[in-house]
Image: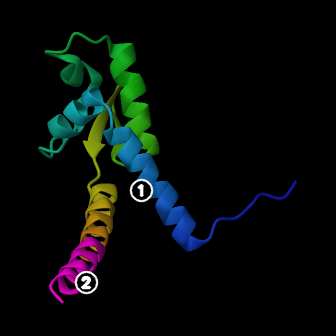
Amino acid sequence: MSQKRRSPIAAKRHTHASVFAALGDETRLALVAKLAGGQPRSISQLTKGSKLTRQAISKHLRVLQTAGMVQSVRTGREHRFEFNPRPIEGIKQYLDFVSEQWDQALSRLKSFVEM
């Protein structure tokens, strides 16, 4: 069975969508904030101060891993999770691009209205 290939633009859109979807949850945003400090953390450390179980935190971490924002590194018997900023940087570039398009459109509208 052949698998349908995405164009590079469609693949990028899909990647951006998965990052937006992953960040669309309050718990995952909190996990990203904890991990963005640069220190790898265990699930125990990430669960501390939360009302969520380790299993719930693990599920949220899997979503962040799928989006490429978190990676797991095994240290002894435990996994430590690290933040990967690349997907967020890609989103920032995308938002800058969209912002520029809006700025240009608003500038054209302003010129038209002032005529």
Give the image location of residue 53, x and y in percent: 31, 10
Q: Nearer the viewer, mark 2 or mark 1?
A: 2
In what quadrant of the picture does the C terminus appear?
bottom left
Numbered disc 2: secondary structure: helix
Give the answer, above or below, for where 45 lies relative to 36. above
| Residue 111 is a magenta residue | yes
Q: Quadrant of residue 92?
A: bottom left
Question: What is the magenta range?
Answer: 101-115
Residue type, mark 2 in image: Arg
Residue at horizontal 28 percent and vertical 56 percent from the top: 88
| Residue 78 is a magenta residue | no
Give the image location of residue 105, x and y in percent: 28, 77
> Outermost residue, bottom direction?
115
Q: Residue 110 or 19: which is nearer the viewer?
A: 110
Give the image location of residue 114, x and y in percent: 15, 85
Instruction: Find residue 108 and name its label.
Output: 2
Instruction: Find residue 104 and name its label.
Output: none
Residue type, mark 1 in image: His
Give the answer, above or below, for where 91 lies relative to 61. below
Residue 86 visible here: yes
> Outermost residue, front direction?
115
- Specify whether 49 is left or right of 6: left
Numbered disc 1: secondary structure: helix
Main secondary structure along the magenta-highlighted residues: helix
Residue at horizontal 77 percent and vertical 57 percent from the top: 3
Give the answer, above or below, for where 7 lies relative to 2. below
Instruction: Find residue 16 and name its label.
Output: 1
Q: Quadrant of residue 59?
A: top left
In what quadrant of the picture does the N terminus appear?
bottom right
> Which one is earlier in the sequence, the residue at label 2 or at label 1?
1
